[in-house]
Amino acid sequence: MIVDQSVLSRDGHHSLDHWVRVLTNGRRLAEFTGANLKVVELFSLFHDARRFNEGYDPEHGLRGAQFATEMQGEWFDATKHELELLVYACENHSDGLTDADLTVQTCWDADRLDLGRVGTTPKAEYLCTDAAKAPDMIEWAHGRAVK
């Protein structure tokens, strides 16, 4: 349902392949950070789900958060706190922030570790968690992103 409603090409930089890499990155990071895995997994699906284009789209995170809120109770169940974390993570994932709840930081890092898809190697100074900043984590995620 989420994939079917996306207006973007399935071959684009923000396609299903990106969502799956963010999911995998997030799951791996959560093993180290102790982040709420439900929120991390939901973030991977909703953070870019309402993009209108592959370029500049400053409201896409807000739209993704609103979509997640609409789907709560219908497509997934989350506590009030989990939904608040998911909404905040989606709304702010493109703003370059690094200070937030550990689960939110894990979400943002999962997305930023996939920058190789657009020709950029993730830099530790733009990541939030020690787990994401580890050179072996950056190398692992970047290798997957550029395939």
Image: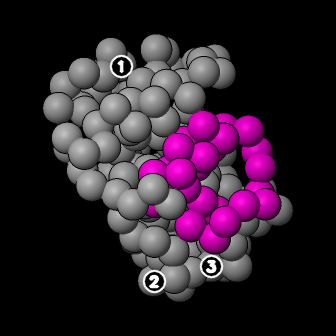
Please indicate whether residue 83 sits to the left or right of residue 123 in the image: left
Between 11 and 51, the one nearer to me in the picture: 51
The circle drawn on residue 31 is 2
Which amino acid is tagged 2? Answer: Glu
Query: What element does badge 2 sit on?
Result: helix
Q: Is residue 136 found inside the magenta-colored segment of the image?
A: no
**Label 1 element class:** loop
Residue 147 visible in the shown view: no
Q: Earlier in the sequence, mark 1 or mark 2?
A: 1
Q: Amino acid at mark 1?
A: Leu
Pinpoint residue 135: horizontal percent, then vertical percent.
Answer: 67, 77
Is 93 left, or right, of 53 in this rendering?
right
**Residue positioned 77% across, 49% down in the render:** 97
State the extent of the magenta-drawn residues as a range. 82-106
User: Residue drawn 40% across and 70% down?
Assistant: 37
Q: Which mark is residue 78?
A: none
Q: Amino acid at mark 3?
A: Ala
Distance from Cα at disc 1 to Cα at disc 2: 31 Å
Q: Looking at the image, which is closer to me, 20 or 49?
A: 49
Q: Nearer the viewer, mark 1 or mark 2?
A: 2
Residue 117 horizontal/vertical position (percent): 50, 42
In the image, 49 versus 125, the foreground residue is 49
Placement of the N terminus among the 4 image quadrants? top left
Q: Position of residue 115 (x, y in %)?
A: 58, 47
The answer to whether residue 98 of the structure is visible from this angle is yes
Secondary structure of the magenta portion, mostly?
helix
The circle on residue 131 is: 3
Query: What residue do we see at 77% from left, 57% from top?
Result: 98
